[in-house]
Amino acid sequence: MPRPKAPSLLVVLSGPSGVGKDAVLKTMRQNGYDIHFSVTLTTRPRRANEQEGVDYHFTSVDKFREMIAARELLEWAQVYGNYYGVPRAQIREAMAQGKDVLLKVDVQGAATVRGIAPEAVLVFLLPPSFDELKQRLVQRHTDFAMDLERRLAAARREMDSLELFDYAVTNYSDALDQAAAQIQAIITAEKCRTKPRVVKL
């Protein structure tokens, strides 16, 4: 007797700043993984290498606050002076079409999603070492020294939240395909559960 199709998954990818979340997501897109990639809404300025609607949706602070008031965001946070949030509509629409959804949030946001959707799959992206995480942040050339130290202090705290997550994937340098494949393997395994996760938003 054939099994019914497993319900759509809500997969949450999180980890400290600089660990490579965007790079892993880009690799998954390029490799053609069959999943809906939720695009985060932010008020921070767009970097030179970022595309509207692909890397982020960029908006004004006023518009973001209007969406908070209208409860249009699944979760949101103010991080390093900028707002980040996940619009509910795009997730609901994708899941209604039978698609699995992958969204990227910070550790605080992952905790919020777990509270709203306990059946979400939470994946923590780890650096190979803390020294390498620091080097990646330095190479970005986007942070002043004081901000760099603040991000590193936050990363140390975020590492202590690992037990909140269902899975941990290490993002080694020059091995983005490996991290992407491990996340896809997690999704495949979750789709094979005898008691599937049912996400309600």
Image: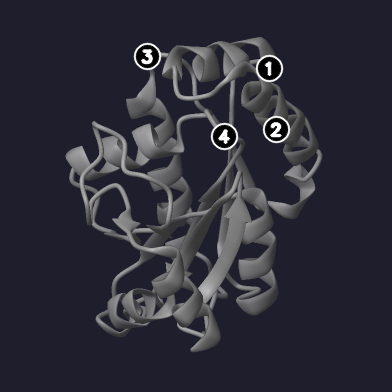
Check contact, mark 1 vs mark 2: CB within 8 A: yes
| Residue 79 location (% of width, % of height) | 60, 49
What label sits on residue 174 in the rendered view? 3
For discs 2 and 3, the disc positioned in front in the rendered view? 2
For discs 1 and 4, the disc positioned in front in the rendered view? 4
Q: Which one is earlier in the sequence, the residue at label 4 or at label 3?
A: 4
Type of the residue with mark 3 = Asp
Q: In this rendering, is residue 60 above or below 28?
A: below
Q: Which one is earlier in the sequence, the residue at label 1 or at label 4?
A: 4
Q: Residue furthest bottom?
A: 70
Q: Nearer the viewer, residue 56 or 82?
A: 82
Q: Secondary structure at mark 4?
A: loop
Q: Is residue 88 visible?
A: yes
What label sits on residue 167 in the rendered view? none
Type of the residue with mark 4 = Ser
Check contact, mark 2 vs mark 4: CB within 8 A: yes
3D distance between C-alphas at marks 1 and 3: 17 Å
